[in-house]
Image: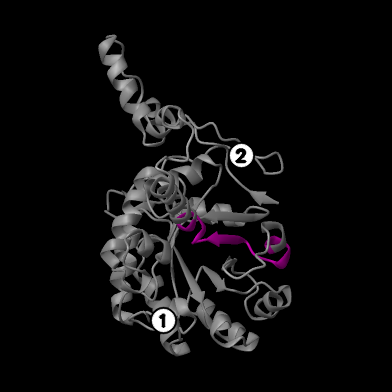
Amino acid sequence: MVRQRPPSPRGSTSTCSGRYERRPAAPKALGPAVRSTEGRPVSTSASRLRALLKEPGILAVPGAHDGVSARIAEQAGFSAVYLGGNALGISLAVGQPLLTLTETADCSTRIVRTTPCPLIVDAGAGFGSVAQVHRTVREIESTGAAALHIDDQPYPKSVDYHRGKGGLVDLSEAAARIEVAVKARQHPDFMVIARTDVYRATGDVEQLARRCKAYAQAGADALLLLDVEDPAHLQRVRQDVPDLPLMWIGGVVPPVLSLQQLEKAGFAAALYPFNAIAAVVQSLTDLWAGLRESGRIDQADDFLLRMRGGMSRLAGMQTYWDIEDALRDRRPLGSPQSLQ
């Protein structure tokens, strides 16, 4: 069973397919943190993400590289979103290996302000040494994100990684990153996910199991396995790590498994980091190529008229329209919940 949330009430016309479980909409995101009188964070969207991972079925997590792509995923009925480093790097036209912690945290902040869906953030290799991982966790947690993942690639990131020439750091260093990340978080529900690229780099299932066990012992809340799809490989990991949620990420090289196949293999969640930004790039490439070649935009004449209202609502304009209408008509503004 694939899990989704009902469509957002923000003027969305999308609906969930009948094969998906329907459940009440998630509450609003709590912002960077809600603090007790002692100054400690008392609740974040991380608790919702943890609850989602405990539900039956597989959690599908679409990639989002900005606020509008996150809101589209929410209105399509998904319960969580994922900020991938590759998508963010492409959207900034700099590439993932050159991304900074500041750019990542800024985008995380914008997404959290846009959608109540819990956000998982790609923190790469931690943006520095093992000691610097501590600040990375604090910065990303303070944006209101529900989780981050840290991988076992070297830092600085190799610019050759996306040409299939990436490497790995020693197991001890990678495990230390996870241990420091767990100790750095300020709220116990904030999830530290350990990502391993070892299977892509080596194709060795025993090394995969060894690293997963070490990351679990370091305190990881979940394991993100790159390019691992064979149920037998997951069973081997389960021998050493019986309890942690296993997450899938991949999908670049065909054939790409369906959510049903990934669930059957044993995954609790599937992350789709690249699909949204790839769709945007392809759509814009085709759009402007058509104008250059034919002198016309390949869209129906009323396309923008039909889309304008929906896009304005997607951007949250309905809230402000309601305020102006109430003031003009001398009506009460209503409850804060009604102006969201």
Q: Which amino acid is tagged 1? A: Asp
What amino acid type should be assigned to the residue bearing mark 2?
Arg
User: Which of labels 2 and 1 is toward the front?
Assistant: 1
109 is higher (above) or lower (below) than 334:
below
x, y percentage for residue 17?
67, 40
Residue 315 position by quadrant: top left
The location of residue 129, given as percent across then percent down, is 31, 82
Is 203 on the left-hand or right-hand side of 300?
Answer: right
The quarter of the picture where the C terminus appears is top left
Depth order, front residue of 295/289: 295
Magenta stretch, residue numbers: 262-278
Q: Is residue 126 above or below residue 314?
A: below
Q: Which residue is mark 2?
A: 23
Residue drawn at 32 percent across, 23 percent down = 321
- Residue annotated with mark 1: 160
Relative height, residue 233 to residue 31 (above, below): below
Label 1 CA crowd tier, 10 Å (few <14, some 14–19, many 20+): few
Q: Is residue 339 left or right of residue 255?
A: left
Residue 323 within the segment the image draws in magenta: no
In the displayed structure, does residue 212 sit left or right of residue 186? right
Alpha-carbon span between mark 2 and mark 1: 43 Å
Whole-percent x, y for residue 153 in the image: 43, 81
Position of 37 with respect to 63 (left or right) is left
